[in-house]
Image: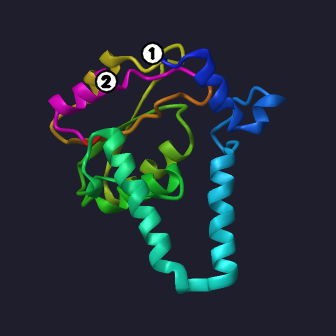
Amino acid sequence: MANNLTEEEITEYRKLFPVTKKYVYLDHAGVAPISTRVRDRVDDFINSALYKGVADYDYFMEGVEYVRANVAKLLNSDIEEIAFIKNTSHGLSLLAKGIEWKAGDNIIIFDKDFPTNVYTWLDLQRVGVEVRQVPLINGRVELNEIKKNIDSNTRLLSVSSVQFTSGYRADLKSIGQICKNNNLIF
């Protein structure tokens, strides 16, 4: 992805993250550094809860809707398509439990993917869903391996956009096209 920011803009954004004065922070998978803007909003929330309790519920929800609208605009989608969840594990669990599976359905995942993106789907074996674990070739997702594993019973493909062990970035555009061509949830 191209970066069209100037050096000055990058410097200004870095100022929002005081941690960057001392560290180059690369482990965003767990708890990432927050910006001063986030800290300020959290302080607002805590002070409101401290002094007003639930009396400010409507104000909080207005904030949520404001953010949803801005995220929808950023992603060129409808606000109804935007939901906030706790983390990826929670989202995958909601997806897995929200689909009506039947025995014989199959899904495609990748071996050595992040554990949540493996065990969430393996749990569906108890209801008769076949879980096809496609091998990563040299730590990479190979498109031909995906295509070889799709059949008329394949309903879903789940892949991490970045492999947590190698840092490999999956070609989501090409994978998404394969899924679209085969009517798979992706």
Does 147 sit above or below residue 64? above
- Number of numbered discs: 2
Q: Label 1 to label 2, Cα distance in Å?
A: 16 Å
Q: In this rendering, would 176 be left or right of 123?
A: left
- The amino acid type, in three-letter code, at marker 2 is Lys
Q: Residue at (44%, 71%) from the top-left corner? A: 61
Chain part drawn in magenta:
166-184
Q: Earlier in the sequence, mark 1 or mark 2?
A: 1
* Circle 2 residue: 173
Coloring basis for residues = rainbow
Tell me which corner region of the image, top left, top right, bottom left or bottom right, holds residue 11. top right
Q: Residue at (78%, 36%) from the top-left corner? A: 19
Q: Quadrant of the N terminus?
A: top left
Give the image location of residue 62, x and y in percent.
42, 68
Does 2 sit above or below residue 157? above
Q: Tell me, yes or no, whether the two marked residues, 1 and 2, touch with CB atoms within 8 Å.
A: no
Q: Quadrant of the C terminus?
A: top left
* Circle 1 residue: 2
Can residue 166 be seen from the camera position used here? no
Tell me which corner region of the image, top left, top right, bottom left or bottom right, holds residue 28. top right
- The amino acid type, in three-letter code, at marker 1 is Ala
* Farthest residue, direction right: 22
Helix, strand or loop under label 2: helix
